[in-house]
Image (cartoon, coloured by chain):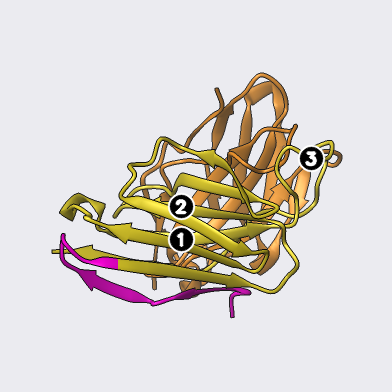
Amino acid sequence: DTEVTQTPKHLVMGMTNKKSLKCEQHMGHRAMYWYKQKAKKPPELMFVYSYEKLSINESVPSRFSPECPNSSLLNLHLHALQPEDSALYLCASSPIPLLQGTGVGNSPLHFGNGTRLTVT
Amino acid sequence: AQSVTQPDIHITVSEGASLELRCNYSYGATPYLFWYVQSPGQGLQLLLKYFSGDTLVQGIKGFEAEFKRSQSSFNLRKPSVHWSDAAEYFCAVAPNSGGYQKVTFGIGTKLQVIP
């Protein structure tokens, strides 16, 4: 069982819908991530939060809006998506906070099982 | 900028045979290196990681990887493959300063195991 929980597992939405993806972890990690993975492609970083503050936005379109309401939760709000946004959306967490420390850490990313999103 | 190359998109091995998956990286210094495995429709599970020290790293499920600085490689090996090892394998690299904020994944190698 993964220690990072993502809901829902599957989501189908129209281009005019508003929906949200949720991610939760209780490992005390202070960095949380959203990745997007298209079929037969590697995961691509979208956003990173450190101490509940957005620290990296990889030039993601504004139709994707992340939110980190507390240290355990990470949301991704979706609005006016396009069919090409259909993908597996992976949440991850890490105990190493961004821009802190010497970088000599021992704990890598912990991934959830993802939300399979289909935009029709 | 860091990058990862996995030259083999698809590999087929017989159950019980040995396995080696190749990974080469490009980075100005020695980065942090990882191997992840992904089963269909699932998230990624860490197999092993290299930060420093011993260049031969042991991981879960009987996997190991060897860091070779001179070849900029971090190949994954397993002496005897099991049918349950069929999955997608991703090599990944992260900068060795500032944490894990920009983990870059290779394109992945799909492993097929035949009886």
Determine the residue located farthest toward the bottom in the rendered image: A1
Residue B12: x %, y % from top left? 38, 56
Circle 2: element type? strand
Residue B7: x %, y % from top left? 42, 36
Give the residue at mark 2.
A35
Mark 2: amino acid:
Tyr
Range of residues picked out in magenta: A1-18
**Eye-nearest disc, 3 or 1:** 3
- Does residue B54 sit above or below A93 in this rendering? above
Q: Chain of mark 2?
A: A
Q: At 38% from the left edge and 76% from the top edge, which residue is drawn? A: A9
Q: At 69% from the left edge and 74% from the top edge, which residue is drawn? A: A26
Q: Chain of mark 1?
A: A
* Callout 3–callout 1 Cβ contact below 8 Å: no
* Callout 2–callout 3 Cβ contact below 8 Å: no
Circle 3: element type? loop
Q: Are marks 2 and 3 on the same chain?
A: yes
Give the residue at mark 1.
A90
* Callout 1–callout 2 Cβ contact below 8 Å: yes
Circle 1 Cα neighbour tier, 10 Å, few/some/many (<14 / 14–19 / ≥20): many
Could you tell me how far apart the alpha carbons at marks 1 and 2 are, in whole angstroms?
Answer: 5 Å
Give the residue at mark 3.
A100
The picture's colour for chain A is yellow
Badge 1 or badge 2: first in the primary sequence:
2
**Eye-nearest disc, 2 or 3:** 3
- Name the quadrant containing residue B66: top right
The picture's colour for chain B is orange
Q: Chain of mark 3?
A: A
Q: Are marks 3 and 1 on the same chain?
A: yes
